[in-house]
Image: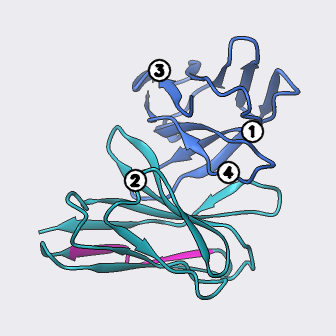
Amino acid sequence: DGGITQSPKYLFRKEGQNVTLSCEQNLNHDAMYWYRQDPGQGLRLIYYSQIVNDFQKGDIAEGYSVSREKKESFPLTVTSAQKNPTAFYLCALVGDTGELFFGEGSRLTVL
Amino acid sequence: QQQVKQSPQSLIVQKGGISIINCAYENTAFDYFPWYQQFPGKGPALLIAIRPDVSEKKEGRFTISFNKSAKQFSLHIMDSQPGDSATYFCAARIFQAGTALIFGKGTTLSVSS
C-alpha cells in the first residue's frame, strides 16, 4: 500500500509529557510537511523538510521538534513546552507535479 | 502579505444549488492556487487547482474562477449534493520556489436534501 502513513490516529497525553507522532512515506519524495489544524483556524505550518538531514521552522514551530534522518520518515515531537497541544496534526508530502498530499492525520488530546 | 482570506466561514445550500466559496490574497508572487476538500476525521484531499495563466478551470461539477487583477479566486460547486458536505480550504504558494502552502481558514459546507 503506497502513500503517507500517520500513526497513531488518536493519542492522549498528560501535561508535561513529550509525545512523538509518526509520518512515513514510501513514495520516495523529498519534501515533507507538518501542519496543525484547529477548528476555525485552517492549517498552520509547523515544520517542513525538503531533504534528508535538513528542516525549517514554519509559522508555529515553538514547542515542537522534528528530525529527518531518513527520506521516508519525518517524525514530529510535541514537547512539554507546547502550551496548547490539543489539535489535529497532518503530515503531507509534495507529489511529482507539485501538489501537496496529506496523510489521514493524528488527533492529540491533552488530559 | 502571506495571508489567504477565505469566506464565508460556513455555507448552507439546497441540494441542486450552486455553492460559492471565495478567497483573496495579497502576495502577487503566488502562482499556484489549489482547493482542498476535507471530511471529518480525514486529511484534506486535493480537489482542483489553477495557475494564474488561465481565468477558469473546470473539473466535473467543480470550477475555479481566477481574477488576477483583483487577486481573488473562487470555487463553484454546481448541482451541489449532500455528499459534497465537507470543509473546503483554499490555498496559495509560490510553486517553483517550493515554498509551503498558505491556507485559508476553511469553509464548512452543508448541502441539505
From the image, tell me which residue sits under label 3: B14
From the image, tell me which residue sits under label 2: A60
Name the amino acid type tagged 2. Ile
User: In the image, A98: left or right of B46?
Assistant: right
* Chain painted in cyan in the figure: A
Name the amino acid type tagged 1. Tyr
Local crowd size for mark 2, using a 10 Å CA cut-off: few (<14), some (14–19), many (≥20): few
Quarter placement of the C terminus of chain A: bottom left
Name the amino acid type tagged 4. Thr
Q: How far, Cα to Cα, is label 2 from label 3?
A: 38 Å
The residues colored magenta run: A4-12
User: In the image, A68: left or right of B12?
Assistant: right
Which residue corresponds to the image point at 74% horizontal and 38% vertical from the top-left?
A: B32
Name the amino acid type tagged 3. Gln
Chain B's colour is: blue
Q: Is residue B55 above or below residue B61?
A: above
Q: Position of residue A51 (x, y in %)?
A: 69, 74
Which chain letter goes with mark 4? B
User: What element does badge 1 sit on?
Assistant: loop
From the image, tell me which residue sits under label 1: B32
Local crowd size for mark 1, using a 10 Å CA cut-off: few (<14), some (14–19), many (≥20): some
Which chain letter goes with mark 2? A
User: What element does badge 3 sit on?
Assistant: strand
Q: How is the image coloured?
A: by chain
Whether residues under marks 2 and 1 lie with C-beta atoms below 8 angstroms apart, the answer is: no
